Amino acid sequence: LDLTHIDKNVRPQDDLFRFMNGKWLTESKIPDDRASDGAFYWLYEQAEKQVKQIILDQAQLKAAVGSNAQKIGDLYNSFMDEAGIEKLGLSPIADDLAKAAGIKTVDDFLKTLGEFEARGLSGLFYSFVSTDNKDSTKNIVYLGQSGISLPDEAYYREGEYQGIRDAFTAHIQKMFELANLENPTLAAQQVLEIESLIAACHWDQVKDRDAELTYNKKSFAQLTQLAPEFDWQIWISSSKTPMQVLEQV
């Protein structure tokens, strides 16, 4: 127990929380670089430092080829190799850029989308397998709203977030410039417009946390009826999702 935050002006039998934490509540300030602070953030910060030290230790070892230690060390060293990164330029993502540029049809888009998602990139929705919220004897597939870069749908429509939208568009433009893509300014604006259209179909945070509203179990046949323009077979094949997994969503 950390006893340094005790407020002895408060009797514990009157307000145990204020007695134990009163001094911290009165004197502590949230640092300007984050939105919250407290014991759990301190634990997180210490854990991050410990993980960093573990990685540094592995990066300095001459570990056995193929071992986890060797893989961790190589990954870290490659990430920190700024000169090597600058020398490689766009070459590590050249194939991905070419695939994206080669999209001509909706089917091309779905195929590419699935291929990227199979490698961990986000798509129009997210999916995972977990216990059925209303039948603990079964595991089912869950699909959820995704496809946007900003935290939630409000960031695309409310006036208070205009500055964030402007900064987001500038960031996308810079990424397109670095990727040597044509018309980066126009393309960045198109990204914002597309994501705004997707966000307009999203539920707000309150609805998205509602256990009843978000429980809409469907068969695969019903899913295809809900999204007839989305060719699920193309996406299933390109994302390497086992068909039996989507028998019930």
Image: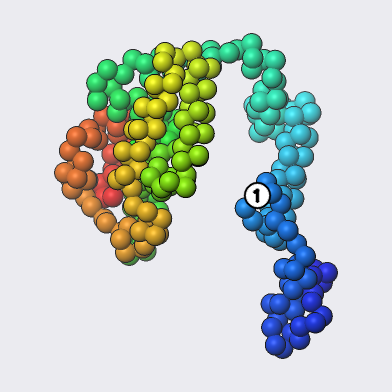
The answer to whether 97 is drawn above or below residue 244 in the figure is above
Whole-percent x, y for residue 49 in the image: 75, 44
Whole-percent x, y for residue 122 in the image: 43, 36
Residue 196: quadrant of the picture: top left
Residue 97: quadrant of the picture: top left
User: Position of 144 compared to 21: left or right?
Assistant: left
The one nearer the camera, 127 or 17, is 17
Mark 1 secondary-structure assignment: loop
Q: Residue at x 74, y 85 (%)?
A: 12
Q: Residue at x 31, y 38 (%)?
A: 197
User: Position of 161 compared to 40: left or right?
Assistant: left
User: Around disc 1, counting alpha carbons within 10 Å, would you say few (fewer than 14), some (14 to 19), or many (20 or more)?
Assistant: few
The one nearer the camera, 67 or 235, is 235
User: Position of 154 compared to 8: left or right?
Assistant: left
Q: Name the image quarter holding the N terminus.
A: bottom right
The answer to whether 187 is drawn above or below residue 45 in the figure is above
The answer to whether 93 is drawn above or below residue 63 in the figure is above
Any part of residue 194 in sight: yes
The one nearer the camera, 178 or 65, is 178
Q: Residue at x 26, y 55 (%)?
A: 217
The one nearer the camera, 32 or 58, is 32
Residue furthest to the front in view is 159
Whole-percent x, y for residue 25 in the image: 72, 68
Q: Please name the amino acid that badge 1 sits on.
A: Arg
Residue beneath disc 1: 34
